[in-house]
Amino acid sequence: MITGELKHQVLRHFNFTPTPEQDQALTTLSQFLTDRDSRSVMIFRGSAGTGKTTIAGAVVRTLLDLKMKVVLLAPTGRAAKVFSENSGHVAYTIHRCIYREQAYKGVLGTFNLGNNLYQHTLFMVDEASMVYRASDRTGNKSFEDGFGSGSLLDDLIHYIYSGQHDRLILIGDQAQLPPIGDEEAPALCTSIIQSYGLKVFQCDLNEVLRQKRGSGILYNASNIRNEILSFKEASVYGALTVPKIHFDGFADVVRLSGEDLIEQLSDSYSEVGMDETIVITRSNKRANIYNQGIRSQVLGIEDELCGGDQIMIVRNNYYWMAQNKKENSQQPDPSGHQEQNNRLNFIANGDRAEVERAYRSRELYGFHFIDVDLRFPDYDDQELSATVIMDSLQTDSPALSREQVGQLYDRIMEDYADIPRKTDRINRLRGDIYFNALQIKFAYAVTCHKAQGGQWNHVYLDQGYITEEMLSPSYFHWLYTAITRATGKLYLINWPKTQIEGETEKE
């Protein structure tokens, strides 16, 4: 009876007649929410266009109406912002919810798992396909990570189920790119979640809604997802063929030549804005080329960095928010009141910002630095003054290389050579503005991993040169993820005829 009543309440916020598949999902969700086992968890999987987001939003609104405590989380700031907009309730990044800065380890900040003070609270994590489990994803954990055990999934599960009667819903799409180093998304895998000793409820949405079938973006994404599921079930990858895109009859999927790119990008910036336009590429090298071309040819920017520039932080940084540490030490408020809770306490790899002012350029230690005033649109437009290191903009690697960071370390440490104790030298180094300078890249064009979790009205996709020899499951996941970043229009740049449905028949 309780389960049926809760389902009825959710349906009041659904605004559509559910499909049989959606109805079953609502039943399973209601069973989970009314289950008395405090060690239960819900895995809610669904592809783009199936109503997963709509159902999740309806569940959130229902629970808030019933005065239940809900905390919404996502792996990135952009993903949290999208989740918040879709649900009507403030969302936070996982890292900012579960970790607390404890101490410096060497020259890097260390964030330990915080104490869960919540009681009878439901945590909902969107874009759970991005939640990594491996403790050494890059082979360089000690140098780069600094968060808890190094396994975000382990820490998330431990944090939530250490509370009093707190539970978790994991929401995501298995067809998206899994975390780097993983073949599948561990947070959406039933057997992995069961291995934590949890009782698992699960449901899947696969049917694209009737009202969305007219979308070329969803039509093509669904076709690619079906191919992913088919070869996953068969466990045979040798017969993969190049996926073909359907353009005919769809106004939201556009084939775009390189010659028309500048004009079309300019139109998108005018029509939907820079924050709702993105170019997605296969490599950092290609993204760099696009970023330089967009700044010079589309935006007409000649300065190396200036006000209005869109940038992305490409390495975690703890230094510049230290002065706000006390203010930002609060946990998210389950009531949904943002106030000071949704503010930065550290700057994460992948966070986006807009440059409001760039000034005081100088060369030091063999590197180039500029002071900037930044605004973070994904965090309530919080503003910050910092120093950035310009050398990371041009490198084809995701950030400064280990060698470059080592060079900077050695040269700055020479300034402190007169300090006898190494511990004191390290303390001076970790307070040095140049060693702590933000590593950035321009954010007009990004790789798919950097775009994952976000959505943009206009997405420009450049996959580069693809042959059948290059086909793999990871390519299909990449293409599906890139396509589903678009909510309005998808522009495919220099798309080959061999990947266009019906093109060969017409010739």
Image (spheres, rainbow, N blue to C red):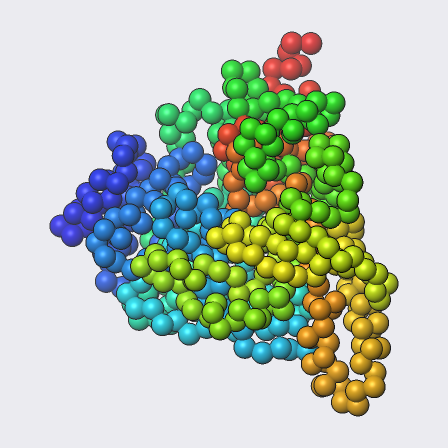
Q: Is residue 428 left or right of residue 79?
A: right
Task: Farthest residue to the top: give it.
Answer: 506
Task: Farthest residue to the right: give it.
Answer: 366
Q: Position of residue 48 (x, y in %)?
A: 46, 36
Number of numbered markers: 0
Q: Which residue is drawn at 34% across and 61% down?
A: 334
Q: Where is residue 356 in the image (x, y as percent from the top left)?
A: 63, 50
Visible in this render: residue 296?
A: yes
Q: Where is residue 352 in the image (x, y as percent from the top left)?
A: 59, 50
Q: Nearer the viewer, residue 352 or 189?
A: 352
Q: In this view, does 35 lie to the left or right of 338?
A: left
Task: Farthest residue to the bottom: give it.
Answer: 420
Q: Nearer the viewer, residue 492 or 445?
A: 445
Q: Nearer the viewer, residue 402 or 235?
A: 402
Splitting the image into 4 quarters, where does residue 401 fall? bottom right
Q: Residue at x 56, y 64 (%)?
A: 346
Splitting the image into 4 quarters, where does residue 203 fall? top left
Q: In this view, does 205 lie to the left or right of 7?
A: right
Q: In which quarter of the image is the C terminus?
A: top right
Q: Where is residue 37 in the image (x, y as percent from the top left)?
A: 27, 64
154 lies above or below 460: below
